[in-house]
Image: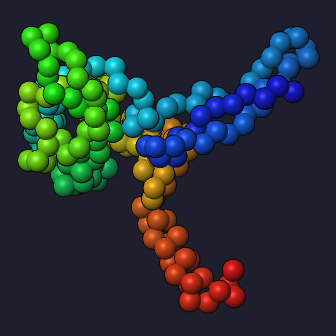
Amino acid sequence: MRQTLCRLCVGPWRSVRYVASAARDPAKGESRSHESFMPVPMAERDGKAVATAAQVLEWRGWARGHAADVESRADRRDGLPPLESLLTELDWIVEDAVAGVREKVGHSGSGGVWRGSGQLLDGNGPQRSCQVLLREDLDGLRRMWTTRLRDRVPVQYLTESCHWRDLVLVVTPAVLIPRPETELMVDFVAEAMKQRPALA
């Protein structure tokens, strides 16, 4: 049996590898993998498109307006979260999509070192003329957001990730999305074990 290493991302600064096995199909004389495609969460992908901070913020403005419009016409029973939750999800998408920011250098607009995204979404972020390295281009983000609102696909499935405590978990429609309440359970258990070590 041959072993294949695949990457499972658990945070922005480190990753863990897990081992998946691949077996040979004796009937066909070929290798058959027992693993399925392991997606890379958007927050862990390499940057592939460049836009200005102004373009990213303009896209965010469009997305916020589109969410408000769809939410105002939605029936509460159709599964669309309230506007406040949608706007939070939108900011998660932007944070995951931004791979880096750099000052615009020279006439060509290239050069300079990519730095962390900082606070792109608040007033203390980079200048609007700064370049933003995106993990998904603005058209792809538009399609993603439209799918979220139209088809009610959870944002975690669209970004193929769920931030849980200090981990970035890979999620697809084949798995359940970890509930935020489970994070509290870890805290409750840790506190109970601290108060009563005999529970361990």
**In which image quadrant can residue 4 be found?**
top right
Q: What is the x, y in percent for residue 17?
A: 64, 39
* Left or right: 163 in relation to 127: right
Task: State the scheme by which the image is colored.
Answer: rainbow
Tell me what residue is drawn at x 40 percent, y 34 percent: 42
* Viewer-side residue, 20 vs 158: 20
Q: Is residue 147 above or below residue 137?
A: below
* Viewer-side residue, 116 vs 193: 116
Q: What is the x, y in percent for residue 156?
A: 40, 43
* Left or right: 82 in relation to 144: left
* Count of numbered labels shown in the rendering: 0
Q: Quadrant of the N terminus?
A: top right
User: Is residue 77 visible to the viewer in this orientation of the structure?
Assistant: yes
Q: Quadrant of the C terminus?
A: bottom right
Tell me what residue is drawn at x 16 percent, y 27 percent: 103
**In which image quadrant can residue 127 be found?**
top left
Tell me what residue is drawn at x 48 percent, y 51 percent: 167
Q: What is the x, y in percent for residue 10?
A: 52, 46
* Left or right: 98 in relation to 182: left
Tell me what residue is drawn at x 46 percent, y 43 percent: 13
Q: Is residue 107 above or below residue 139?
A: above
Q: What is the x, y in percent for residue 161?
A: 44, 42
* Viewer-side residue, 176 vs 89: 89
Q: Is residue 161 above or below residue 134?
A: below
* Viewer-side residue, 10 vs 156: 10
User: Is residue 54 visible to the viewer in this orientation of the structure?
Assistant: no
Q: Is residue 198 above or below residue 110?
A: below
